[in-house]
């Protein structure tokens, strides 16, 4: 089992920045893909960004150029830097890990990000 704990969410204004963190523990392997998803009220969960052990990244079109994903393999931690935040970025953000960009086996509990206009 892998345990994931997210942190860094909060209430900010449009245009502000935040950094989310997700620390992994347990039977975590650095070869895992680490990703971020989000779910807004009344909407399905959607992919935000992902990063491989070798720092290859993928982004959703809606966040590309504004969000940056990074990871520290020594700390088993993945980060999501959220810049130029918009009210439509308001959601619960979840961290996930797995062996493929479309296969995530473990999920965190989520951290709330609220962007006011």
Image (tube, grey):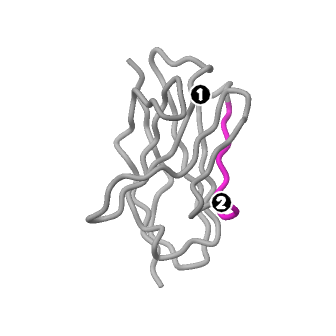
Q: Residue at x 40, y 26 (%)?
A: 105
For the residue carrying disc 2, how many other residues have a C-alpha within 10 Å: few (<14), some (14-19), or many (20+)?
A: few
What residue did someone put label 1 on?
A: 76
Label 2 secondary element: loop
Q: Residue at x 48, y 85 (%)?
A: 117
Please give the label number shown on residue 112: none
User: In which image quadrant can residue 67 be found?
Assistant: bottom right
- Is 8 situated left or right of 52 in this image? left
Q: Per the image, is 25 magenta?
A: no
Q: Residue at x 38, y 47 (%)?
A: 110
Label 1 secondary element: loop
Q: Is residue 46 above or below residue 14?
A: above
- Is 66 situated left or right of 105 in this image? right
Q: Position of residue 85 (x, y in %)?
A: 57, 71
Looking at the image, tell me whether mark 2 or mark 1 is earlier in sequence order. 2
Residue occupying the far top of the picture? 27
Q: Position of residue 74 (x, y in %)?
A: 68, 24
Q: How many marks?
A: 2
Q: Is residue 109 above or below residue 11?
A: above
- Is 23 situated left or right of 55 in this image? left
Q: Position of residue 104 (x, y in %)?
A: 44, 31
User: In which image quadrant can residue 30 be found?
Assistant: top right
Q: Residue at x 67, y 27 (%)?
A: 53
Please give the label number shown on residue 64: 2
- What segment carries the magenta color? 65-72
Query: For the stretch drawn in magenta, what is the main secondary structure?
Result: strand
């Amino acid at each position: 089992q892998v345990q994931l704990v997210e942190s860094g969410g909060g209430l900010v204004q449009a245009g502000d920045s935040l950094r989310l963190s997700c620390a992994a523990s347990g039977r975590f392997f650095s070869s895992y893909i680490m990703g971020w998803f989000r779910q807004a009220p009344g909407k399905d969960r959607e992919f935000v960004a992902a990063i491989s052990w070798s720092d290859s990244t993928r982004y959703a079109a809606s966040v590309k150029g504004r969000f940056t994903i990074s990871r520290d393999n020594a700390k088993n931690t993945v980060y999501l830097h959220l810049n130029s935040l918009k009210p439509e970025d308001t959601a619960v953000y979840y961290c996930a890990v797995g062996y493929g960009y479309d296969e995530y086996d473990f999920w965190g509990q989520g951290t709330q990000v609220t962007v006011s206009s």
